[in-house]
Image (cartoon, rainbow, N blue to C red):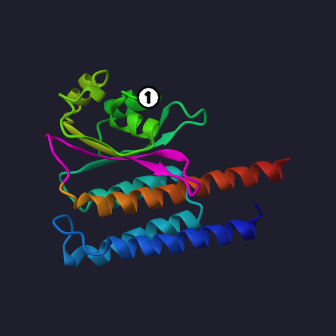
């Protein structure tokens, strides 16, 4: 893909993201009318970072902080699917304990691999209301408990072609069931994260072709 085609593709993705912002609209019980404009402005800033080819880690961290700002009790992360398609790689988790981030980085995905590893494996959202009781967390329960995490809801990040790129997760420090209000935030996060990840991969592919 040459520079002009890549630019057109990114522009089209951003147009779709503008529609996602419109769909987010009012976010009851999570955001108020007063900060909806700030939330939209924050999304635009992240999209500008993508257009400016900012490092992926910085983009994802800004996105995660933006989502977390909408609900003080929520801790979020973006994880990436490894190139071999079998492992979790760190993307951004600025508010999670460092020991937990290190423990998760490099873990395999699979049918019983916590919320994120299972969501990537299934290609579907995974809602765990209580980490200490859910069998999906059996192998990771101690590390989660040590980090003070009790609930984790994870949604896969998909490419435009329907391929799993990673996952976006919401964590809480007490058992919790989704109310439905979180869906708008998840939609924004997964959509923008998908744009960022695909853009970085396109840039890497372009540099590889130019270096040949």
- Residue found at x 40% / y 45%: 124
Residue furthest right in the image: 212
As drawn, is 180 to the left or to the right of 14? left
Instruction: Measuring from the top left, give residue 19's x and y in whole percent.
Output: 44, 75
The image shows a total of numbered marks equal to: 1
Q: Is residue 119 above or below residue 104?
A: below
- Residue found at x 50% / y 51%: 158
Q: Mark 1: few, some, or many residues within 10 Å (few <14, many ≥20)?
A: some
Instruction: Measuring from the top left, give residue 92's x and y in whole percent.
Output: 41, 46
Q: Give, as a single range, the part of the protein colored magenta.
A: 155-178
Q: Is residue 178 above or below residue 187?
A: above
- Residue found at x 20% / y 64%: 30
Q: Which corner quadrant holds the N terminus?
A: bottom right
Which residue matches tag 1? Answer: 110
Q: Is residue 138 above or below residue 47?
A: above
As drawn, is 148 to the left or to the right of 80? left
Instruction: Measuring from the top left, give residue 53's x and y in whole percent.
Output: 60, 61
Q: Is residue 120 magenta?
A: no
Q: Is residue 94 above or below residue 160?
A: above
- Residue found at x 44% / y 70%: 45
| Viewer-closest of 168 and 63 | 168
Q: Is residue 176 magenta?
A: yes
As drawn, is 190 to the left or to the right of 65? right
Instruction: Measuring from the top left, give residue 182's x and y in whole percent.
Output: 25, 58
- Identify the secondary structure beneath mark 1: loop
Q: Quadrant of residue 69?
A: bottom left
Q: Quadrant of residue 98?
A: top left
């Amino acid at each position: 893909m040459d520079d002009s085609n890549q630019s057109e593709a990114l522009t089209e993705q951003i147009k779709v993201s503008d529609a996602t912002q419109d769909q987010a609209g009012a976010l009851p019980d999570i955001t108020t009318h007063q900060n909806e404009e700030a939330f939209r402005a924050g999304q635009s800033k992240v999209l500008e970072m993508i257009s400016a080819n900012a490092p992926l880690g910085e983009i994802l961290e800004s996105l995660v902080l933006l989502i977390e700002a909408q609900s003080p009790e929520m801790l979020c992360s973006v994880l990436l699917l490894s190139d071999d398609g079998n492992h979790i790689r760190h993307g951004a988790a600025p508010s999670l304990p460092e020991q937990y981030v290190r423990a998760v980085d490099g873990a395999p995905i699979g049918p019983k691999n916590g919320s994120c590893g299972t969501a990537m494996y299934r290609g579907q959202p995974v809602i765990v209301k209580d980490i200490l009781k859910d069998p999906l967390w059996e192998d990771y329960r101690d590390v989660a408990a040590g980090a003070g995490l009790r609930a984790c809801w994870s949604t896969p990040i998909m490419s435009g072609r329907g391929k799993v790129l990673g996952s976006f997760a919401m964590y809480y420090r007490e058992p919790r069931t989704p109310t439905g209000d979180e869906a708008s935030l998840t939609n924004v996060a997964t959509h923008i994260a998908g744009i960022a990840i695909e853009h970085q991969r396109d840039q890497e592919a372009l540099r590889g072709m130019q270096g040949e």
